[in-house]
Each structure stands twice: as C-alpha cells, then as structure tokens.
Image (cartoon, grey):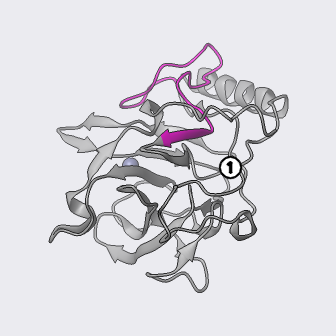
C-alpha cells in the first residue's frame, strides 16, 4: 500500500509539472448588480487556481472518481455557483484527502485539501469577509459572502492573514491565512466549503446549504484566458 501511495504522489507531481498554465480569474464584474462585492481586477490577489486537482491516496472517504494517475475527473479550476465564478480549490499544490458527503455517520460539508509543506489559502471569489473566528470544530475559520446567496468557508487555518477582518471587501485570490490543523483536525489541511442560502437568519452561516465544489458547472471562459 505504501508503495502505491508513493507512486501515485510521484505521478501527480510529474503530471503537474506538465499541466496547462494556472487558471486566470476573469476581468470585470462577476456578480451583475451586486455592489456589495469587489468587482475590479485591481483588487485581485496573487492566486491562480491549479488546472488539475489530484486525490492524495487511492482510498479515502467520499473519494471522487479519478483517472489512473489520481487526477480528479470532475474538478475544474473555476466553477459557477448561482452566477458567481469561484475557485473549486482555494490553494495551490494541494491534493484531496477527503471528499464531500456522508462520512462516519455525519455529513462532511466540504472537501479537505492537503499540502506539504502547508501553503497559503486564498479567497475563492470576490466578496465581503463575514466571519474571522475561532470555532471548536473548525478552529480558525473564515467565511466570505460573494453575493447571490453564495458563500465560502475555509477552516483549520494555522493563523489569519494580517488585517483580515469581518466587514471588509476582498478580491479574488487574496491571502486569508495559512493552512493548519486548528480545531478538530488530525492533520494539516484546509477544509473548504461552498455554501448557498440566506446568511441573515439566527443560524448565520450554520444554516446555509453545503454543496460539493465538484458538482458546479465549469466556467465557460476557463480555457480562453490562459
Ligand atoms: Zn473537512
């Protein structure tokens, strides 16, 4: 088993070096009519999503379908959720250690992404920071609202980026903090969620619907900007 895992990881690294260039986020407004979110390219950060995402190992809970090299078939660098263009993975150089769906009798509402060493985590779309907090389960976690009832959560961070605070506008690909293992985490990784619904209820983000990032349609401009 150990040999197989090492082989998969090596294949992933080799394939990554021959990957197409990272995806570019589109220029201009991404949520028509919503003035609460950042829309200017000048507000973008340095992040460019990886073109491919690999499964870390041959077996884990909710593992999505892959090709023989472990490349996840349903992954697209940029996807569209209710009109909002989002990165399906908010980190570079990571692989998936757990997928979306029922797991050990509870619901895994996101995907787990791991990198060695730990890597920075970035905003998956322009929006407004809603939560920068510490939770018993999620540890240091960030929630961003992107307009149109679309939200993203990033959990188990080692620390937050300096100056990150609720209420501020944020562009695509801005650093949020460093991958870590705060809260209920057995290893360094980021737990990433794409949520939909209405934040303005007593339950706040805990009442939102969790979605599988791999289920959203690919952004149609993905291959036109690289
Ligand atoms: Zn998770």
Q: Would you say the magenta stretch is mainly helix, strand or loop?
A: loop
Compared with 34, 164 (above or below) is below
Left or right: 8, with 217 as reference point: right
**Mark 1 surroundings: few (<14), some (14-19) or many (≥20) residues within 10 A:** many
Residue 5 placement (x, y as % from top left): 60, 27
Q: Which residues are magenta?
A: 58-80
Q: Quadrant of the N terminus?
A: top right
Q: Residue at x 28, y 70 (%)?
A: 136
Q: Nearer the viewer, residue 186 or 13?
A: 13
Residue 51, picture quadrant: top right
Q: Residue at x 55, y 19 (%)?
A: 66
Compared with 202, 187 (above or below) is above
Q: Residue at x 28, y 64 (%)?
A: 205
Based on the picture, tell me whether residue 1 belongs to the magenta stretch.
no
Counting the numbered discs, the total is: 1
Residue 148 placement (x, y as % from top left): 39, 55
Q: Nearer the viewer, residue 165 or 55?
A: 165
In the displayed orientation, state which residue is furthest to the top: 68
Q: Nearer the viewer, residue 17 or 33?
A: 33
At mark 1, the secondary structure is loop
- Residue under label 1, please give it: 92
């Amino acid at each position: 088993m150990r040999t197989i895992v090492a082989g998969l990881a090596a294949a992933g690294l080799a394939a990554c070096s021959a990957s197409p260039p990272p995806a570019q986020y589109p220029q201009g407004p991404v949520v028509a009519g919503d003035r609460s979110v950042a829309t200017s390219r000048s507000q973008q950060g340095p992040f460019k999503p990886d073109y491919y995402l690999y499964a870390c190992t041959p077996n884990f809970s909710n593992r999505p379908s892959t090709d023989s090299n472990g490349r996840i078939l349903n992954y697209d660098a940029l996807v569209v959720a209710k009109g909002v263009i989002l990165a399906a993975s908010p980190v570079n150089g990571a692989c998936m250690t757990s997928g979306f769906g029922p797991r050990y009798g509870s619901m895994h509402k996101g995907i787990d992404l791991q990198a060695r060493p730990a890597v920075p985590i970035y905003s998956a779309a322009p929006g407004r920071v809603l939560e920068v907090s510490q939770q018993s389960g999620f540890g240091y976690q960030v929630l961003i609202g992107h307009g149109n009832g679309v939200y993203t959560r990033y959990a188990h961070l080692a620390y937050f980026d300096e100056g990150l605070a609720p209420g501020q506008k944020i562009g695509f690909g801005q650093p949020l903090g460093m991958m870590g293992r705060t809260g209920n985490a057995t290893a360094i990784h980021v737990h990433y969620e794409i949520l939909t619904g209405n934040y303005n209820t007593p339950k706040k983000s805990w009442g939102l619907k969790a979605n599988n990032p791999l289920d959203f349609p690919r952004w149609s401009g993905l291959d036109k900007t690289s």
